[in-house]
Amino acid sequence: MNLSKIDLNLFVVFDAIYTEGNLTRAGQIIGITQPAVSNALARLREAFNDPLFIRSAQGMVPTPIAQNIIVPVRQALSMLRTSMQESDSFVPSRSEKKFKINLQDAVSSFLTPHLLSKLGKEATKVSLDIDGPSNKDIANAFTTGQLDLAIASLVNPHPQLKRIKLVESQYVCVVRKDHPISQLNFTLDSYVRFSHVNLVGCEGLIGPVDTTLGKMGIQRRVIVNLPHYTVAPKVVASTDLALTLPEIFAKDLDLKKLEVPFKVEPYELYLYWHETSHNDPANQWLRDQVIAIFHNLLTEEAGSEIEESPSIYFSRQLVEQLEN
């Protein structure tokens, strides 16, 4: 039997006939006429090459083949009904969904432990598939269904992508904790005299810091370019090298933090999703978890008055979403 040639609605009729033992009552249950039920039964008989039901004084009596298939038919119909119901809702404690998320390395180190902790409490069967950029491929990955969310500083514009700014963070410079430099004598000249670790982000080797210095006609001395955020602080902790990074990623480091002695455009982090997932309950739930994690972590950092923190703060758009 070629299932692709079978109208699946016929199995709804089959279940109704099996349950009622009467064509007229079966039609009343599913809202079609008795002739339509008869027509559906005829098509089922042809597909299975079996009468399926025999008319008797007791009603329509199922044949052995009908008896053999009724259980899997009802199981399949139940799964379809459940799928239709769950398309309008998402129950984290029952879901076995795997979410696919694109995260930059530094964001993953910051977010993943908190997100997994959240899942462990509320959605124990939900799993994550976390991948890193290339940011240039994110829009296509959304379009082809390979991604549920992306959290990144910059993604190539795409008309079908929605986004919300999660956070804005100033850059800081970190050195080992016992380094003799202090904020009082940390000037542009001293910054340039340092040897630096450079985190290679989606912008490539030349990020916002070097772009800003370049506009001033200054070039810092980069000793090593690193693609992995988790390695860079360890390098700094054991050397005289300096690392410049958004303060949001420096907040938990056991390193000395110095305000960058020149103006750099703040780091902005966005949550991205595809417009086709905007009203999907599962995607909405995951977005809410990410937003809540950032809210908890950053308000803890900034104190109760978010606007008073000059270095890390939520966008007003995000605060309004949280309030709503």
Image (spheres, rainbow, N blue to C red):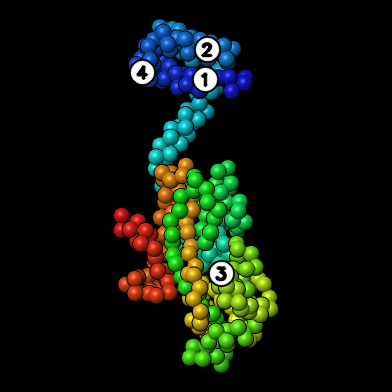
For the residues labelled 2 and 4, the Cα–Cα distance comes to 18 Å
The three-letter code of the residue at mark 3 reads Pro
The residue sitting at 67% across, 72% down in the picture is 225
Q: Residue furthest right?
A: 223
The three-letter code of the residue at mark 4 reads Gly
- Please state which of residues 237 and 138 is positioned toward the viewer in this rendering: 138
For the residues bearing labels 1 and 2, Cβ distance under 8 angstroms: yes
Q: Where is residue 12 in the image (x, y as percent from the top left)?
A: 45, 22
Q: Mark 1 points at which residue?
A: 7
**Given this view, does label 3 or label 1 mark the residue nearer the observer?**
3
For the residues bearing labels 2 and 4, Cβ distance under 8 angstroms: no
Numbered circle sitting on residue 66? none
Is 193 located above or below residue 134 in the figure?
below
Numbered circle sitting on residue 31? 4
The three-letter code of the residue at mark 1 reads Asp
Disc 3 crowd rating (10 Å Cα; few below 14, some 14-19, many 20+) is some
For the residues bearing labels 3 and 1, Cβ distance under 8 angstroms: no
For the residues labelled 1 and 2, the Cα–Cα distance comes to 9 Å
Numbered circle sitting on residue 208? 3
The residue sitting at 52% across, 51% down in the picture is 157
Q: Quadrant of residue 13?
A: top left
- Please state which of residues 199 and 217 is positioned toward the viewer in this rendering: 217
